[in-house]
Amino acid sequence: MRNICSVLFGVLLGSVLLHNCGKNPVSVDGDWVSDIPFMLGDINLEIQHDNRIYETEHFLVYSDAASDKVRLQFAAHAERALDELMDAFQIPDAAAIGIVDQTSKLMIFTNTALTRGQSAFPTGFILYGEDSEVFANWPHEMRSRFYHEIKHETMHVLQYKMGVGVPPNSRNPANLPDKWFNEGLAEYLGGGFMEPITNRVEFEQWRRPSDHINPVSIHKWSDLPINMSIAGEYYPAFALAVRYLLDADSMGKTLMDVKDMFALLAEGNTTFADAFDLHMGISIGEYEATFISRVAEYLD
């Protein structure tokens, strides 16, 4: 297991101080606001909340019953994640992805109710917080990597803000990234909520169960060999598939190539398969057919 950086939270004068990985503390200022509906994506569905909302520069943090500590924690994590991801994609400022005022800020729902689930959508995400029963039942290693889960979900939202998966191109499934790429990119750039695969032994251990098939063959969730109950088990392998594309020692592609691919997809006239072929330098079919041997050699 890799060493996990410790995260300490302090609340002082409406700010969250985040200490981690030897970086300087990041102060996230905010205010408590109310009477702003939490709308689920672009389907005009309002989700009920307790009307105690924490507003930061780019986010509105809602909940059904979470503690103030958890809301502040989400705010600090999300602001840090968005900043790191925008820097990685060379996005100059929030206005470039449409965040210009309170009405366009990203909405986060820190969820305690077991019936609400978790999901990302074009304007934000819903995710269980530290005071939920779901979080309490996660293994310690997953709980200690919680920042990576928030960054994973933030990457999904950033992808939407870059025009991928929103109308009009979301009406054509062929224009959407394959599930292995969509989840792999979020997991890789998020730093790995699930423990990453780092060597060939770990990859072979991952492959051992009969329901762990070639991850690049999971173009849609129905391609899973059984059902969605095992989807999370694939995330480390999805992340490895994206890492192989972006590592200078293998395919050598960059996030600028991914950004250009997203820009092409956002136009709505190109399939993911064609956009991938153009910007990743290999066809989906060839990558799927050669992935196991490529990665085995890469990890040696």
Image (tube, grey):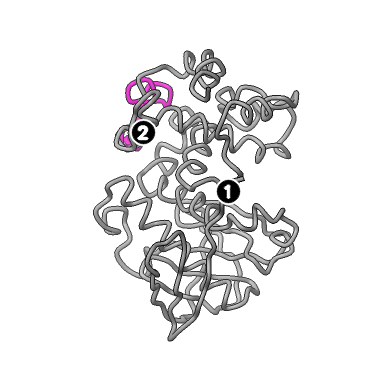
Q: Is residue 61 magenta?
A: no
Q: Residues within 10 Å of mark 1 (few under 14, many from 20)?
A: many
Picture quadrant where residue 237 is located: top right
User: Measured from the top left, where is residue 209 in percent x and y?
Assistant: 75, 27
Identify residue for label 1: 193
Q: Is residue 92 above or below residue 269?
A: below
Q: Which label lies toward us, 1 or 2?
A: 1
User: Among all residues in the image, which is located at the extreme bottom?
Assistant: 13
Q: Is residue 234 above or below residue 136?
A: above
Q: Residue at x 59, y 70 (%)?
A: 63
Q: Disc 1 residue type? A: Phe
Q: Residue at x 55, y 78 (%)?
A: 51
User: Measured from the top left, where is residue 211 in percent x and y?
Assistant: 73, 26
Residue 40 located left or right of residue 254 = right
User: Measured from the top left, where is residue 5 in percent x and y?
Assistant: 52, 58
Residue 80 located left or right of residue 49 = left
SS type, badge 1: loop
Q: Is residue 155 above or below residue 259?
A: below
Q: Is residue 235 above or below residue 220?
A: below
Q: Disc 2 residue type? A: Leu
| Relative depth, front residue between 99 and 269 | 99
Q: Main secondary structure of the magenta part?
A: helix
Q: Which mark is residue 265?
A: 2
Which region is colored magenta?
Answer: 263-279
User: Measured from the top left, where is residue 147 in percent x and y?
Assistant: 53, 58
Q: Is residue 266 magenta?
A: yes
Picture quadrant where residue 48 is located: bottom right
